[in-house]
Image (spheres, helix red, strand yellow):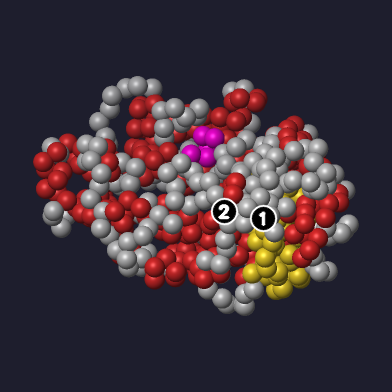
Amino acid sequence: MSTTVTSRVRADVTTPHRELFLLAVTALAEGTDQYHEPDERFIGLVRKLALSDDGWLVQFLAWLRGFDELTSAAVVGSAEMVRTRLANGLTTSGGSRKVIDSALQRADEPGLMLAYWFRRYGKTVPKPIRHGLADAATRLYDEEALAEYDRSGADARFADVISLAHPKAGSREQQELFQYALTRRWGSATEIPAGMTMARARAALYQLSIAQRRALLDSSEAMGLFGAAGMTAALLPGWLSGQAPDDRAWSALLPRMSYRERLARLRELAAAGLTGQEVLADPARVAAERIGPLAVHAARREVTAPGWDGPLEAAADAALALVPAVGGRTLILVDRSASMFTQIARGSAATVADQAAVFGACLALRSAGAALVQFGTGHRRLTFSPGQNLNELLGRFGEMGDGNAAAAVRACFDRHDRVVIVTDEPHGSAWQGEHPAAAAPAGVPVYIWNVAGTPQPGAPGRGAAQGRYVFTGLSDAAFAVIPLIEAGRRDRWPF
């Protein structure tokens, strides 16, 4: 949550509850990196509410933890809340130890919290925080977590948490793992304990010669051995001595890959000869892993081989169903000026224009009443019906020259409850002349996603007190933002 976000949000609030909530939602709108440390305003509000309304704050922090994009806010906020309560001789609603434990849901997060504490407050850690860290370590530390998250470059590693918090092992095998992590941390060569069967199986895989590794891929044992060793897609090329994995290697690893990881590596999987039905056979996993339409569509652009359309269509339908419905009437404008047609990332087949169109189209299809407009030098309304195929609707977007969002707003606004504009940077053609937010009537909320640039703090119409919101960046988390902001303005919390 940057200081730019803070300055935008502060004008829109009358209570610390609302300001803290809107800070979090704004970070969600912008797809903030999940381990981006919150700013001082966020921390100050947590401390204030820790003393005035800790019951609300406990619920708020638990809600934050439901979003990957807000993980760091939940981790830091929980530490600050407990510290503030302890410093004032107060207990915490639900118990300080439990608050700390529940904030930590991934195995690297006890170390992240400890590293934050060390940076800010030094090496002395209060007992309730140590106990919460210990509970989390017992719950989260296992062989797979050790292999994936105990990185040598981390500010605080598993051994640092173990040596400070003294977690109680849940089994003899976990006690061996704790001891192994401690010994490994401080540079002592040590044999892998007998109880760490995954680490021993992985070591055995790496002891194979190159010829033996290739022969293994031709055997029926490869899938079972990969599973026993906790092999990952990131490790596979190194295990193959730098060679690109082929269909045998990917097929052996596929059962261990999440649906999200499969989508992220779709180009590699398709190039190796795997089929869409093999890779994306279970679209129910889209909902289970909370994968949104932007992620599915970005993957969809990576594959041109035949046989993938059906599975990807099913995945897209499942992702669209996860988009929160928006009530009322919404005017949605999507920028199709030439500057939008740049890659979302180097090497990606998807463009900024693609992502903007997907966001606008999905929002329209999930709105009770929406007008969908593409704009550039001119503007054109795209008609659609409820339940229409998303891909067909996306195919009707075009390129429309230099943009004029304000003209499109003025021409298309018809007593709508809100206006949504998806565009690129404010210095570009989409912002020529009048600021687009100023073209909407006073009192009508305007949400602008500036998907490729940096907002100007002094731009006309900025200031959430007037219901004008400008966000930088775009991710699937942004679909939840409009109903959250509008509920938060009425103090209707989602927790």
Q: Nearer the viewer, mark 2 or mark 1?
A: 1
The residue at 61%/44% (across/down) is: 452
Contact between marks 2 and 1 (CB within 8 A): the answer is no
The dominant secondary structure in magenta is helix
- In this view, the residue in front, 477 or 367, is 367
Q: Identify the residue under disc 1.
A: 376
Magenta-colored stretch includes residue 110 = yes
Q: Residue at x 47, y 55 (%)?
A: 298
What are the residue bounds of the magenta stretch? 108-112
Does 401 appear in magenta?
no
Residue visible at 57% across and 63% down in the picture: 397
Assign a secondary structure to mark 1.
loop
Q: 152 left or right of 495?
A: left
**Apparent side of residue 475 relative to residue 26 in the rendered image (left or right):** left
Q: CA distance from mark 2 to mark 1?
A: 12 Å
Q: Is residue 58 visible?
A: no
Tell me what residue is drawn at x 39 percent, y 68 percent. 309
Q: Position of residue 161 (x, y in %)?
A: 49, 32
Q: Callout 1, which amino acid?
A: Gly
Left or right, 141 with reference to 218: right
| Residue bearing the label numbered 2 | 353
